[in-house]
Structures are given as C-alpha cells and as structure tokens.
C-alpha cells in the first residue's frame, strides 16, 4: 500500500473548465495528479467509489515520486453532501479548489454533456428535463441511485450550500474559490494565484488548453452502443489507438448548442437569484451579474 496520499482536491464544478485547469496545473513539476483510466472517474469520496477501500485507493498513488502536491479531481465532490467530511477525515490538512460558473450556463451545458457525451440523460429538451427533476428526486428517495445525481440539475448548482459546507469543514483559508469568468479572462493570473495558494513555485512553464468542447451525436443508436459499452465494444475500441477519437470525429463532433430560450433563462435567473445573493455575501464578491443579461 502506498503511504502517499492526496493533499489537495479539485472538487468541481462540472462543465466549468476544470479539465483544462487540471491539465495546466499538472504541468508543474512538483504536482502529481491521479489520472484514473476509463471507465473509472467516480472518485472515492462521493456517492460511489471506484475502489473497494482506502488501501486500493492509495495504491493508485504508487507512482508519486518527490512531488510535494498530490491531487485528485472529481466534479461530484462539490455537490455530494458527504464528500467534504469524508475528505477531511482522510486528509485533514487538504487544500480544496473549486471553479464556479454561472449556474444557468452550468445546468444547460451539463444537460448537453449528459445527453451527447453519455447516455445518462434521455430527455432531449432542457426545459422538460428540468420539469422531470421533482419526479426523479422522489424516485431517488424511494429507490436510491435510480437516477444519476447529475440529473438533479438544480441540486448541482446550489453553490452557497456547497461552498459553505467546505468553508465550515476545512476553514475558508484552505478553500480556493475561482470564478469561471475570471479564469477564462486571465488564465495566467488565476494559475499563479492557485500555485501560491498551494504554496508552490509560480515560475513553471505552462501550456494553456481548452479541452472539453460541447458535442452532439449524429446517430443516437450508435452513440448508445458506444457510451453504454454494449457488448464491451467501447472497452475494446479504447485499446486500439485513435479509434475513440475517430468515433468522436464521425458521430460525436464538437458542436455549439443553440442559445437557451430567453423566457426560460429569465425564469431560472429569478429562481436562482436568492442563492446567488447569499453566495455573493459569503465570498464577498458581487456575482449578481449571473442573474442579468
């Protein structure tokens, strides 16, 4: 069993640039990131774990050499209500990093991702998917894990509740909250601030990257076979160089989604405004521009 354990965690948010951010941080010579191979990626401290116990989880860090910062990223850690406490018990002095994006943009982008990058979501219309939340929530209470937690879009973006949970658990000084708008405008500044937060040198040569574009599929049946790994097809193809990339190019290419309906957007802005105001107060940062435009 490895005695080296993670001492910082990127806990989310989903669809908020965390893949690119991890890629950038990982280039620092004194940082090690856990990179689980597909189909793993659920983490260890959320609703479910990729590993049978802590020992198996720690074995994943056997390749750590002399890196001072050892990190893990899992987007579900932000909105899973149990994760902060579980990480604290496992790694009491851990540093926590999160990126928060306009919650409406996050929900809309997440719906696209679950629809076109997986088979988790089957309701094509975003507004209908939102309307299905009460039923999905009720069914999850009756039969735990019947629906993926990400399908409860409003729960995913309860930022005030989520951030406060981490502040209360780790102390505000050990939690770095990055606003997505700041990150996209000035990556170098945000990366420098984050390295300082992690008490790392800031003179590393970093390549910046946008790694996670929105996608659509051309044929849903082929998409289902690939994403659900029916007959083990995706598992086999992933072992053949370039086939997964070729599939995405042919049937699952990058594609800009149409803009969110203005009436629905205004409805969501009004609905989420109280949560955003509380978050603004918690962070001492006015984020009410998320409720406008």
Image (spheres, rainbow, N blue to C red):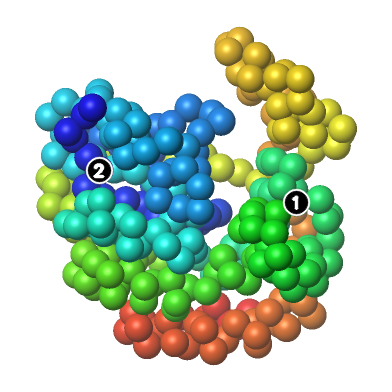
Compute the Cα span from label 2 to label 1.
32 Å
Disc 2 secondary structure class: loop
Q: Are marks 2 and 1 in contact (CB under 8 Å)?
A: no
Q: Is residue 255 visible?
A: no
Could one spot residue 197 in this view of the protein? Answer: yes
Q: Position of residue 252 (x, y in %)?
A: 74, 34
Q: Is residue 80 left or right of residue 30?
A: right
Tag of residue 121: 1
> Which disc is residue 290 wearing?
none
Give the position of the C terminus as an image quadrant: bottom right
Who's the residue at 79% across and 34% down the image? 224
Residue at horizontal 41 percent and vertical 44 percent from the top: 44
Quadrant showing the N terminus: top left
- The answer to whether residue 12 is left or right of residue 135 is left
The image position of residue 233, as x and y in percent, is 72, 18
The residue drawn where x is 12% and y is 45% is: 201
Q: Residue at x 30, y 28 (%)?
A: 59
- Give the x, y percent position of residue 189: 28, 57
């Amino acid at each position: 069993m490895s005695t080296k354990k993670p001492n910082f965690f990127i806990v989310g948010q989903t669809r908020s640039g965390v893949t690119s951010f991890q890629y950038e941080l990982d280039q620092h010579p004194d940082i090690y990131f856990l990179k689980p191979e597909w189909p793993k990626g659920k983490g260890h401290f959320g609703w479910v774990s990729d590993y049978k116990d802590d020992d198996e989880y720690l074995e994943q860090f056997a390749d750590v050499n002399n890196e001072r910062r050892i990190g893990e990223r899992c987007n579900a850690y932000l909105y899973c209500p149990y994760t902060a406490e579980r990480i604290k018990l496992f790694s009491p002095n851990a540093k926590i990093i999160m990126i928060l994006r306009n919650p409406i943009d996050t929900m809309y982008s997440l719906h696209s991702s679950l629809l076109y990058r997986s088979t988790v979501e089957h309701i094509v219309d975003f507004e209908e998917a939102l309307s299905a939340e009460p039923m999905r929530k009720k069914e999850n209470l009756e039969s735990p894990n019947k629906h993926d937690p990400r399908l409860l879009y409003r729960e995913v973006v309860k930022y005030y509740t989520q951030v406060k949970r981490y502040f209360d658990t780790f102390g505000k000084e050990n939690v770095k909250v990055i606003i997505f708008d700041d990150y996209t405008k000035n990556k170098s500044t945000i990366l420098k601030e984050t390295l300082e937060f992690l008490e790392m040198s800031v003179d590393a040569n970093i390549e910046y990257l946008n790694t996670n574009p929105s996608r659509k599929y051309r044929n849903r049946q082929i998409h289902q076979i690939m994403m659900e790994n029916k007959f083990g097809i995706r598992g086999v193809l992933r072992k053949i160089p370039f086939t997964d990339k070729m599939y995405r190019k042919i049937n699952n290419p990058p594609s800009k989604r149409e803009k969110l309906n203005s009436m629905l957007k205004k409805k969501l802005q009004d609905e989420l405004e109280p949560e955003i105001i509380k978050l603004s107060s918690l962070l001492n940062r006015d984020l009410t521009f998320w409720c406008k435009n």
